[in-house]
Amino acid sequence: MQTPILGQAYVARSVNAADNRMINLFPEAIPEGGQTNGFLNRAPGLRLLATLGTGPIRGLWTHQSNGSEAYVVSGSNVYKIDTSYNATLLGTVTGTGPVSIADSGIQIFFACNPDAYVYTNATNVFAKITDPNFAGAQTVCYIDGYFAFNQPNTHYLDNQYI
């Protein structure tokens, strides 16, 4: 089956029918009788609400039981964002790669490979896990009352904390 590619990279009189930037576009069919089967229509996307840190954005999370808060890791800074898009700096994390985030409804776990941090919403405390038995965390999820995370550079899972 042949599938036509819509939205060739050229300039036309209608920006909706031809757009060189293939970002925030969705396909729309043209009724029979047109020269093509369809085109890529513009979708404006999201509007800028806040600028946090210098970036890059390494992780983003919406609180499980309190959907009115979001948490962003921008560069090495961790921010808490409220419904008015005001950002509060919670602390800093290590590393430069992606940050995996999960929450229990009470605490939020930030896995920064290898270091990890926990934020407790009720006490507003953000702290690095410093237990000498903690082997590190690359990714994290919350399941059945535990944070489950894999140790960096292994296939081992752990579920000790919280």
Image (cartoon, grey):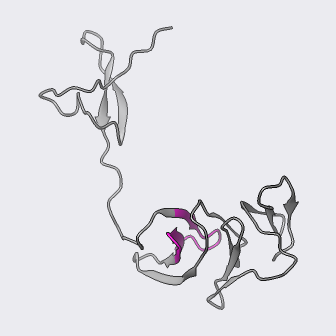
> On the rendered image, what quadrant is the C terminus found in?
bottom right
Query: Any magenta on residue 85?
Result: no
| Number of marks | 0
* Outermost left residue: 13
Residue 4: image location, x then y, percent: 39, 15
Residue 3: image location, x then y, percent: 44, 14
- Quick check: 100 above or below 122? above
Q: Is residue 81 left or right of residue 26?
A: right
Q: Quadrant of residue 154?
A: bottom right
Which residue is at 37% across, 29% downward?
27
Q: Quadrant of residue 137?
A: bottom right
Which residue is at 70% across, 79% downward?
106
Residue 142: image location, x then y, percent: 76, 64
* Outermost bottom residue: 123
Residue 101: image location, x then y, percent: 65, 65
- Quick check: 22 above or below 85? above
Q: Nearer the viewer, residue 99 or 125?
A: 99
Q: Quadrant of residue 102?
A: bottom right
Q: Is residue 74 visible?
A: yes
Question: Which stretch is magenta?
Answer: 58-78
Q: Nearer the viewer, residue 83 or 49?
A: 49
- Quick check: 84 above or below 15? below
Q: Is residue 105 visible?
A: no
Q: Is residue 68 left or right of residue 33?
A: right
Which residue is at 84% across, 64% downward?
144
Q: Is residue 49 left or right of residue 90?
A: left
